[in-house]
Image (tube, rainbow, N blue to C red):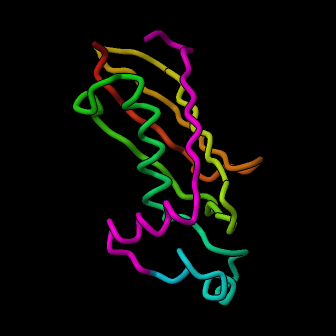
Amino acid sequence: MNVGDTRELTVPVTRSRVVRYSGASTDFNEIHFSDRHARAIGLPGVVAHGMWTMGAGLRVVTDWVGDPARVLSYFVRFTRPVVVPDTDEGTEVVYTATVASIEDGVAKLTITATCGDEAVLGAAKAEVRVA
C-alpha cells in the first residue's frame, strides 16, 4: 500500500437486497420497500438504507487490506440517498478508496461513493493499520 494507490468496488443494489437488509437491521421504514411511502415524503422512489450504503462502502477497504481488524476508524456523511428502481438489475454504487497518506504505520484513505453521476457519501474516510 502506497500513497496514491486506489481500489474500486462496484456493488449492485436491488430491491431484494434492500428488503433483506431491512430484516437484518430491523429497520422496516416503508421508504425502503414502498414507492408510495417514499414519494409521500418527497423521495423519487424506494431508497437503500444509509447504513447499508455506509457498510457496503467499508467493504472496498476490508477487501483491500484483507483483515477487518486492521480498520482503526471509518467516517462518512450521507449526501444523497441511493434510489433503487423496481427492476431485476436495480442500480449500482461504485466505491473508490485512495491512500491519501501513510504515517507511523497508519494509512489514511479517502473514499468516494457514486450512484450514476451522483455522490451518495461525502467526506468518507478510513484509517487502517499498514501490514
Q: Nearer the viewer, residue 95 or 71?
A: 95
Residue that protrudes farthest toward the left in the picture: 69
Residue 19: x and y in percent read: 47, 69
- For the point 70% across and 82% down, which residue is it? 42
Residue 17: x and y in percent read: 49, 60
Residue that protrudes farthest toward the right in the picture: 117
**Quarter where residue 106 is shown:** top left
Vertical order, 35 against 99 (above or below): below
**Quarter where residue 64 is shown:** top left
- For the point 67% across and 54% down, which residue is it? 89
Vertical order, 14 against 37 (above or below): above
As for residue 9 lying within the magenta part, the answer is yes
As for residue 13 lying within the magenta part, the answer is yes
- For the point 58% across and 59% down, which residue is it? 14
Residue that protrudes farthest toward the top in the picture: 2
Vertical order, 22 against 109 (above or below): below
Residue 119: x and y in percent read: 67, 49
In the picture, measured across the screen, residue 39 lies left or right of residue 123, that is right
In the picture, measured across the screen, residue 118 lies left or right of residue 121, that is right
In the rendered image, the quadrant that contains the N terminus is: top left
Residue 8: x and y in percent read: 57, 28
Vertical order, 104 against 81 (above or below): above
Q: Nearer the viewer, residue 90 or 64?
A: 90
**Quarter where residue 123 is shown:** top right
In the rendered image, the quadrant that contains the C terminus is: top left
- For the point 73% across and 75% down, which residue is it? 44
Count of labels shown?
0
Magenta-colored span: 1-28
